[in-house]
Image (spheres, grey):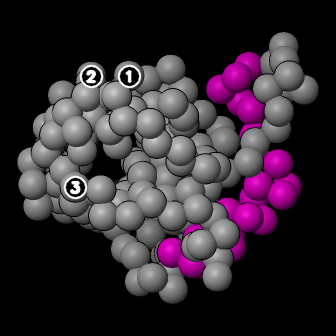
Amino acid sequence: MTDLYILRHAVAEERENWAPKSERQRPLTRKGEKEMFRVAKGMKKLDLTFDLILSSPFVRAKRTAEIAAEVLGLEKKLKLSEKLGADAEPEPFIREARRLFGSARKVCLVGHEPFLSELISLFVRGDTAVSIKLKKAGLAKISLDSIKPGGGILEWLLTPSQLVN
């Protein structure tokens, strides 16, 4: 059994304002960073802990993961993976997940939309047909009996405001 937590990156600079600079380098806003610190403190109140925090290497997701890792005291558990980049696809990710997770049983993925919602749908239903709205800095939990399409149960989906209260 694997507990999979899915965290969307916090509020980032607007794409239109950032262009033509590299999309990979688009950072969180100050407001996004502050909100993520509050969300991470909410995660700590829930006694969440992870064997692995796996993040997209894109700056906005990486910084979101760094904040969560810092607040939870899990800096050494943070790793980056191109498989979670903004242009990632859920099916190839699932094929690689066992290797990426290793022996970890509590894994937090930090990344981007629409990839994360499609990944949730694929794990829970077996396809990407379920419409899910994962807000920026929102967090979902899936219990996986097996790391394959349709192998999980969506336990909960929380908005940032639910996490900070």
Q: Quarter of the image holding residue 95?
A: top left
In the picture provided, is 58 more to the left or to the right than 102? right
Res 31 → quadrant? bottom right
x and y percentages locating residue 112 in the rendered image? 54, 36
Task: Give the amino acid type for the residue marked by disc 3 in the picture.
Answer: Ile
Position of residue 159 relative to residue 126, above or below, is below
Stretch in magenta: 22-43
Q: Which secondary structure lies at badge 3?
A: strand
Q: Residue at position x 36%, y 35% from top?
A: 130
Majority secondary structure of the magenta segment? helix
Determine which of the numbered discs, if any, sits on residue 92 in the image.
2
Q: Which residue is mark 3?
A: 153
Q: Which of pointers 1 and 3 lies earlier in the amino acid sequence? A: 1
Question: Which residue is pictured at 90% across the width and 26% down the height?
Answer: 17
Instruction: Specify the quadrant that holds the C terminus.
Output: bottom right
Q: Looking at the picture, how far across and down is residue 4, in whole percent? A: 30, 56
Q: Tag 2, which secondary structure? A: helix
Q: Is residue 127 magenta?
A: no
- Disc 1 crowd, CA 10 A, few/some/many (<14, 14-19, 20+): some
Front tag of 1 and 3: 3
Amino acid at pointer 2:
Pro
**C-beta proximity under 8 Å, tags 1 and 2:** yes
